[in-house]
Amino acid sequence: MAGIRLDDVSKVFGGHTALEHLSLDIADGEFFVLLGPTGAGKTTTLRLIAGLEKPTTGTVSIGGEDVSTWSAAERDVALVFQHYSLYPRYTVRENLEFPLKSNVRRTPRAEIDARVAKAAKTLRIEHLLDRKTDRLSGGEMQRVSIGRAIVREPRAFLMDEPLSNLDAKLREALRAELKDLQMTLGATVLFVTHDQVEAMSMGDRVGVLNEGRIIQIGTPYEIYNKPRDLFVAGFVGSPAMNVLEGEIAGDRIVVRQGALELPLEAAGRARLGAASGAVAVGIRSEDIRLGPDQPIAARVHDVENHGVEQVVTLRVDDCQLRATVPAIHPVAVESTVRFGLDQAKLHGFDPRTGLRLG
Amino acid sequence: MADISLVDIEKFFGESYVIRKLNLEIRHKEFVVLLGPSGCGKTTTLRAIAGLEEIDAGEIRIDGKAVQRLQAADRDIAFVFQLYALYPHLTAYENIAFPLRAMRENRTAIDGQVKAVAKALGITHLLGKRPSALSGGDMQRVAIGRALVRRPKAMLMDEPIGSLDAKLREGMRTELKRLHLENDSTTIYVTHDQIEAMSLADRIAIMNDGVLQQVGSPGDVYRNPANLFVAQFIGSPVMNITAAAVAADDAATTVTIGAGDGAFGFSPELARRLGAAGAAPGEELTLGIRPEGVVVARSAAPGHVPVEAHIIEPLGAYDIVDLKVGRQLLRARTTSGFVGRPGETVWVRLDETQTHFFSTRTGVALAAGARA
């Protein structure tokens, strides 16, 4: 296994800058997730590392060596895609063997058989080895796709939204399997996704990408609790962090979006640093409290039942906030409730730059 | 809006028995979600209601009238497809106006209706654009607008937000629900995503292999799953499932999980209730408990068993901790950062009010634990 490094990489396609000043340092054996919305440049980054594109400027290194000019085959990394691209009229075994049978490699027959058997065992697809791949379920096909990468014993795995095509339940199950697999193999994995739940549950570290730039790299805990800017704050976490723009006025924040004044106590003030004047205040849904003694009145716009908890959308004038409350408290749509904010969990951002304050 | 009844519906695709004697009542103004894995028959059922598929047996009634022999166009139902199916050569305005023009309404009336629907969906500023200039979320809104503008008896939606980014899906869920309420619609919605179903539905109809597994409110199917399939399909992360051996005396019921991997204490009434529900003494059962039902403490406490914390998944607002109970793995939901690091010993008990028991042979739910 090997580490992967991008140094100040940029990629320009004709008039369009897909990636700008991108630097990444993925340690050997790390499960690194590249997270961002559609169009952010995640797939382009992956293709650059794989050797399917060359950087316009900057360098790509694998295992400490500059591979920027190397071809894809020479880089010895394995790709797993969202759409499996299995050979439909071949069996699972034949699909797994395929990468090892090229003339360039000249892997001996015994070695091919051993690797195929080991990959099939790890992925629990031994019973499917003689089945044609067009007769497999989505989850089975994805396992074969991963198996085809494993048999190559590459220096790193590059996965481009490999679970996006699967049913929600299967995605959940395969997430755990993939993470387990990575830990067992000690593999270096770069996993690309737009799904922040996937990123949080699988990543050792997560790089948040938007419009071709890395905004923040950190552990799931770090990007969730200390988002570097409004984009990360809104993208990581579900429901999205509530953000309100307003003015700090002594012991309250006057919110511009509607007739709403948020109390600002010492603990909250401390979280906003030395800020005064205009501020964008963020509060996560689990840090909003509902109760008869709370300071602010609101109407219930919507209630979503999430089993263990409810997500309640609160409406004050034309301002909306989402609060997560335990399932046991019944809340009715269009009823009036009172809410307050956990001051110690306030986030402050500069409304002009979007950057974190405090 | 309408009452819709599915009576003994059956459907074959060649040899494949895809819908197996399905019965379902959908009430006027209800939001019903057909939920299940790929291939369970939910989309086929929806298409059959719409008239896009024929059924081989049974009746489909809308407001008491049998419609299974009527063409789709004559059923007064609107369908929203997963991949929008917008007319690429028409603007958003023209796409939404299309069904009204087909019904030969007058121009002023059409204009009024299109603009009203666009306002409700927040797409007034997009009306002059063609689909190629629209994002996925915007295209889906136009597709919904095109369905809504006809004020149909029922709105049928086939995974309408499935192809959108996760973040966009969240926002669209609230919009869809509000639209349903504001339009007094009857809505039938198909998805494989149980979070979507739980968030949107008045009632959820869960299907597997063409068979209805359970129909109930989100709260019902979450707290009282009728069988193992429902128990494991609803709820994220998935419910913990282990083998369970039940032994009882007057003081307590002891439940041993796995192959003697760990023993937990429950009230003496539990054994009696399981017996009353049909469990034979000594019969091996299947135990199910959701991660939030696995209660974790950092020090020894009465009724708690010491176990080793394995992997900790930080999910932001909470953590999911894998606990090694002998050779069994149980996943517990804790507050963020509650368990410091993998390898730590913690103390665990199972909340009786959230513990489910199922027949190992049939998968059917027996008595749950005591209700609080």
Image (tube, coloured by chain):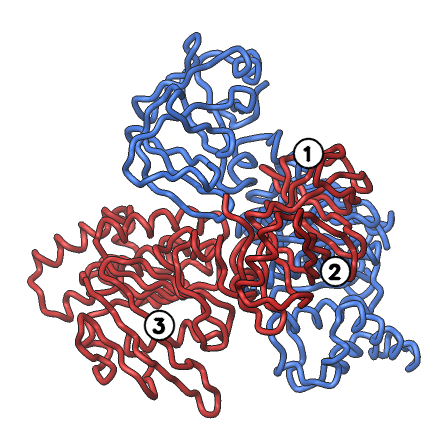
Chain colours: A blue, B red
Kindly identify which residue carries mark 1: B337
Give the mark toward the camera: 1 or 2: 2
Disc 1 is placed on an element classified as loop
Which residue is pictured at 39% across the width and 76% down the height? B44
- Name the residue type under label 1: Gly
Position of residue B11 in the picture relative to residue A333 (left or right): right
Q: Distance between the residues labelled 1 and 2?
A: 28 Å
What distance separates the C-alpha of mark 3 from that of mark 1? 44 Å
Which residue is label 2 attached to? B258
Indicate whether A246 appears above or below A45: above
In the displayed structure, B147 sits above or below A251; it is: below
Residue A146 location in percent, x, y? 72, 67
Q: Which chain carries label 2?
A: B
Mark in front: 3 vs 1:
1
Cα separation, mark 3 vs mark 2, equals: 41 Å
Image quadrant where one finds the N terminus of chain B: bottom left
Q: Residue at x 23, y 85 (%)?
A: B69
On the same chain: label 1 and label 2? yes
- Taking B350 as reference, is B145 above or below it? below
Can you tell which quarter of the image residue A356 is in?
Answer: top right
Q: Residue at x 57, y 73 (%)?
A: B362
Q: Given the current orientation, which residue lies at the most extreme front position? A: B250
How many C-alpha atoms fall within 10 Å of the one at disc 1: few (<14), some, or many (≥20)? some
N-terminal-most mark, 3 or 1 = 3
Q: Position of residue B319 (x, y in %)?
A: 65, 41
B328 relative to A173 in the view: left or right: right
Mark 2 residue element: loop
